[in-house]
Structures are given as C-alpha cells and as structure tokens.
Image: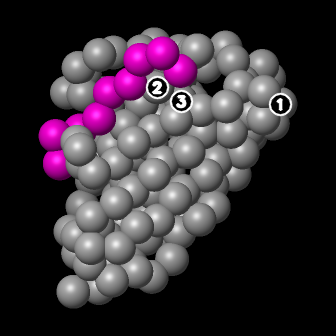
Amino acid sequence: VQLQASGGGLVQAGGSLRLSCAASGRAFGDYVMGWFRQAPGKDRDFVAAINLRGTATAHSDSVKGRFAISRDNAKNTVNLQMISLKPEDTAVYYCAAGRLFYSGSSDYTSNSMIYWGQGTMVTVSS
C-alpha cells in the first residue's frame, strides 16, 4: 500500500484543518488506517485509528473531542478532521496502514502499523 498525505499547513490556534490520505496498491479495505504525529525532538505518537469498515474509531486522549478520523473505502481515502487546534498540535502528521484494530488508544505504537505515508506538516501558531 502506498500512502500520500496532504492538507497540512499553518493555522492559528482555535482554527481547523482537514488532513487527507490517499491510498493506492493493495486493497485499501483490508487495512486498519491510522494517523500518528511527531513533534520536533519527540517520539512519534498515536493520534487516531479506524477499523476496516469505518464503524469503530480510537482517538488519543489529547485529541479526543477535537479530532475525528473517517474513511471512504470507495475512494481509498482516510481523513482527519481537526478543530480547536492548539500550538501543541504542531507536528508532522503521518497516515499509516495496519492489520489490527484496538479500541484502546494506548494499545497503538508505531509497530502497530505496516505502511507509512510521507507526512504532512501542521503548524499551529499561538
């Protein structure tokens, strides 16, 4: 699976952005999709994941209620709608594909995913 993320940019605190990830290659619907982020000088952290059919999601506590992951299997895309952005949301955001869905956000690590996109930068100014 090849993944291409887009939609990042510069936004003021309190603003919104919508990230998209387009997938090509193997059957998109066979993969759990997720978003991770990596701030400068920090580890890559889990943000959100969605199961194969889009009927279940998991979000990290830091973004719960502000971010929402969704997928469109007909279009081979996964999106991350982000509202009420904070400066601490500044990071490179990566979309990823894996095999297992966990309902608990703490179960996700970078090793949970198999394929990774190239990342898109989100900068939130205060």
Q: Amino acid at mark 2?
A: Ile
From the viewer's side, name the closer residue of 34 and 45.
34
Q: Mark 1 or 2 closer to N-term?
A: 1
Label drawn at residue 25: 1
Residue 26 in the magenta stretch? The answer is: no
Q: Secondary structure at mark 2?
A: strand
Q: Is residue 28 above or below residue 100?
A: below
Is residue 35 shown left or right of residue 52?
left
Q: Quadrant location of the C terminus?
A: bottom left
Region in magenta: 54-62
Q: Amino acid at mark 1?
A: Gly
Q: Amino acid at mark 3?
A: Met
Q: Is residue 9 visible?
A: yes
| Residue 103 x/y as whole percent | 29, 16
Residue 58 in the magenta stretch? The answer is: yes
Label drawn at residue 33: 3
